[in-house]
Image: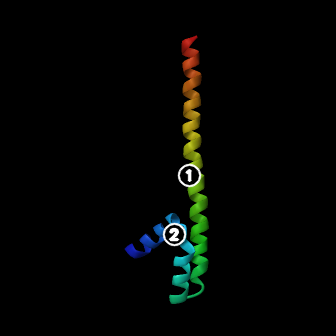
Amino acid sequence: MAVSLVTLFELTVVNNWFIVMNGYATKVHAASRAYFVLFYLFTMVVLTIVVASVLEAFRFRIQYKKQTTKRDGN
């Protein structure tokens, strides 16, 4: 289980994830390529949404602070 988690982490971090995918496909089964591609796409979509949400929350907070300090200063 630990090795599979390291492999999946490597897929999300390393640029050459397709090399790992081809290695598993030659040793295990060619259908494992679909798993790797789906995992990669799903992870990238979810991470993009999470990062965008966090950045939007920070941007909203900064704008809210600016507006409240302008009101208090007047």
Residue 28 appears in the figure: no
Query: What residue is drawn where x is 47% and y is 68%?
Result: 10
- Residue annotated with mark 2: 11
Q: Position of residue 52 (x, y in %)?
A: 59, 48
The residue lying at 60 percent from left, 84 percent from top is 31
Distance from label 1 to label 2 (Cα)? 18 Å
Q: Which of marks 1 and 2 is in front?
A: 2
Q: How crowded is mark 2: few (under 14 residues within 10 Å), some or many (20 or more)?
A: many
The image position of residue 26, as x and y in percent, is 54, 88
Residues tagged 1 and 2 counted as in contact (Cβ below 8 A): no
Image quadrant assignment for residue 29: bottom right
Foreground of the two, 9 or 18: 18
Query: Would you say 2 lies left or right of 9 here?
Result: left
The percent coordinates of residue 54 (x first, y second) are 54, 45
The amino acid beneath tag 1 is Val
Quadrant of residue 25 within the rendered picture: bottom right
Is residue 28 positioned above or below 34 on the image?
below
| Residue 61 drawn above or below residue 31 | above
Task: Name the image quarter holding the N terminus.
Answer: bottom left
For disc 1, the marked residue is: 50
Q: Which residue is drawn at 59% across and 23% down?
A: 67
Q: What element carries label 2?
A: helix
